Image: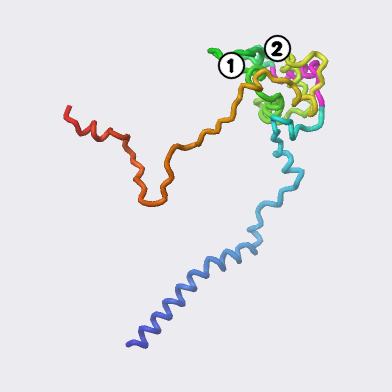
């Protein structure tokens, strides 16, 4: 009887190991199948199409190129005016992109690139990434620089003969640059608990007591 139990136990143990090993073996074999070769390595040139973020305080990542105010006016009138209106004064859907300097401490605030942005390259980053709305990332670097020059010129931040590029853009003195502060407050006020912790309730404190009181 004892020998039979031992044989049964060994058989069960062998079967358990066999079942556990089967998925690993199947996974190893699956990688060798001809129909498992989906995708391909990403080429550096393809990756660069998505690697377009800008370090807005310093202008790090701004591409080569240049734009002027007159060139920006032409690009704006061809690709931006339908939504943002003549001279960026606002269209049927979107508000003005001009003015509002000094309104951040008032109500209502007028939020524009000139009044709100602490760093000028923010405008380049946003326009290149998201505009025009029906064809985002379709503008060339020269066009984005030019549109930015035009909008900042309308806001009185750059002169008519300004040349916008990776060197000059970060140097633009933005009116709202000094209005931002670092929020160094902790992101939670909970006390750390590693053992015997109080359960997190799903009912607001005191709610059950109020419900228990007779009406």
Q: Where is residue 107 in the image (x, y as percent from the top left)?
A: 53, 12
User: Which is closer to the viewer, label 2 or label 1?
Assistant: 1
Q: Is residue 76 magenta?
A: yes
Position above or below: 101 against 119: above
Instruction: Label the magenta part by its dominant secondary structure.
Output: helix
- Residue at horizontal 69 percent and vertical 35 percent from the top: 53
What is the quadrant of residue 104 in the picture? Answer: top right
Report the side of 69 relative to 27 (left or right). Answer: right
Q: Which of 13 and 117 is in front in this view?
A: 117
Q: Find disc 1 in the rendering and name its residue.
A: 104
Distance from disc 2 to disc 1, alpha carbons, whole Å, reads 22 Å
Q: Does the magenta stretch include residue 54?
A: no
Q: Where is residue 131 in the image (x, y as percent from the top left)?
A: 68, 26
Badge 1 marks a residue whose secondary structure is: helix
Badge 2 marks a residue whose secondary structure is: helix
Q: Quadrant of the C terminus?
A: top left
Q: In which quarter of the image is the N terminus?
A: bottom left
For the residue carrying disc 1, how many other residues have a C-alpha within 10 Å: few (<14), some (14-19), or many (20+)? some
Position above or below: 45 against 30: above
- Residue at horizontal 65 percent and vertical 20 percent from the top: 176
Confirm or deny contact between disc 2 and disc 1 (CB under 8 A): no
Position above or below: 83 against 194: above
- Residue at horizontal 23 percent and vertical 34 percent from the top: 209
Q: Position of residue 111 (x, y in %)?
A: 60, 17
Which span of residues is magenta-colored? 66-80
Q: Which of 43 and 205 is in front in this view?
A: 205
Q: Which colour scheme is used?
A: rainbow
For the residue carrying disc 2, how many other residues have a C-alpha within 10 Å: few (<14), some (14-19), or many (20+)? some
Q: Find disc 2 in the rendering and name its residue.
A: 87
Q: Which residue lies furthest to the left in this view?
A: 214
In primary-sequence order, the first of circles 2 and 1 is 2
Q: Position of residue 40 (x, y in %)?
A: 70, 52
């Amino acid at each position: 009887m004892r020998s039979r139990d031992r044989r049964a136990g060994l058989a069960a143990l062998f079967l358990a190991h066999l079942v556990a090993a089967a998925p690993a073996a199947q996974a190893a074999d699956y990688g060798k199948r001809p129909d498992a070769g989906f995708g391909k390595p990403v080429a550096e040139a393809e990756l660069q199409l998505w690697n377009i973020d800008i370090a807005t305080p310093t202008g790090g990542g701004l591409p080569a190129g240049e734009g002027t105010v007159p060139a920006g006016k032409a690009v704006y009138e061809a690709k931006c005016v339908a939504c943002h209106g003549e001279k960026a004064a606002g269209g049927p859907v979107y508000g003005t992109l001009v003015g509002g300097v000094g309104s951040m401490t008032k109500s209502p605030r007028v939020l524009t690139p000139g009044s709100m942005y602490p760093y000028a390259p923010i405008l380049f980053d946003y326009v290149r990434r998201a505009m025009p709305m029906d064809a985002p990332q379709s503008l060339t670097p020269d066009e984005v620089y030019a549109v930015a020059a035009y909008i900042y010129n309308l806001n009185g931040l750059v002169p008519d003969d300004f040349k916008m590029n990776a060197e000059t853009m970060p140097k633009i003195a933005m009116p709202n640059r000094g209005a931002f502060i670092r929020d160094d407050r902790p992101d939670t006020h909970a006390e750390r608990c590693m053992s015997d912790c109080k359960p997190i309730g799903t009912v607001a404190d005191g709610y059950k007591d109020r419900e228990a009181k007779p009406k």
